[in-house]
Amino acid sequence: MTKRTAHNLDWVPPGRVVSMRPAGEWWDAVRVPRAIGLSVLGRLGDDTGAVIEDPGGRLFYWLVPTGHAVAWEFHPAAQVQVLRETAHVAVPGPQRTAGPQWRVPPTRGRCLTDASQLRAALEAAVSAALGPREIAGERAS
């Protein structure tokens, strides 16, 4: 499959429409529970890229460059999940204000979040929310 460039924003549907978009084509998505996501937003500040908020599911979705979050592991209690080629994400149009909507809207200059910065913010937020945890026999913060 040929990867597309996320920054041209051709994957964003028009108006108030919500369209299912395949992860792994323009970006991979990192799904985060809202409680941890709010902390991550605060930690990233202006360094965050676009973020989709699903208020019904109490979830945030960060978009990262494809393949940059492949080996990420968090304690299962954190409920952080990387969505790749086999997943689809509900992507809202720019005017959407109910259901899935943009918490941080994409622009050509602010689209994908740097994966290493997101991971650091996630690790800190998960540790603050859950405390240190063990993953596969190794200490995780």
Image (cartoon, rainbow, N blue to C red):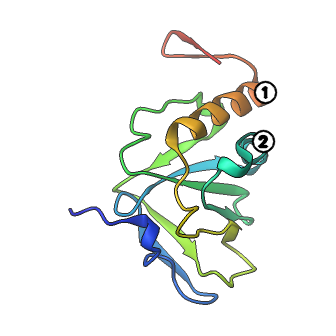
- Location of residue 127 with respect to 39 vertically, above or below: above
**Mark 1, residue position:** 128
- SS state under label 1: helix
Q: Quadrant of residue 35?
A: top right
Above/below status of 15 relative to 106: below
Which quadrant: the C terminus? top right
- In the rendered image, which quarter contains the N terminus? bottom left
Give the residue number, with chain letter if any, for mark 2.
39
Residue in view at x 66 percent, y 35 percent:
121
Q: Is mark 2 on a helix, strand or loop?
A: helix
Asked whether, in this view, residue 124 is left or right of residue 69, the answer is right
Mark 1 is on which residue type? Ala
Name the spot of residue 13 as percent of width and height, x first. 51, 83
**Position of 79 relative to 18 (above/below):** above
Residue 10: give x, y in percent of width and height: 43, 78
On the picture, is 32 further left or further right than 1? right
Q: Residue extending furthest front?
A: 109
Q: Is there a contact, CB below 8 Å, between mark 2 and mark 1? A: yes
Which residue: 38% across, 63% down? Answer: 26
Q: Which mark is residue 32?
A: none
* Residue at x 66% of width, y 72% of height: 100
- Residue 8 in the image: state x and y as whole percent: 43, 73
Nearer to me, 31 or 118: 118
Q: How many marks?
A: 2
Task: Specify few, some or many for label 2: CA neighbours under 10 Å numbering under 14, 14-19, or 20 or more.
Answer: some
Nearest to N terminus: mark 2 or mark 1: 2
Among the 4 quarters of the image, the one containing residue 60? bottom right
Q: Which amino acid does label 2 sit on?
A: Ser
Picture quarter containing residue 6?
A: bottom left
Judge by depth and name the residue closer to the eye, 38 or 100.
38
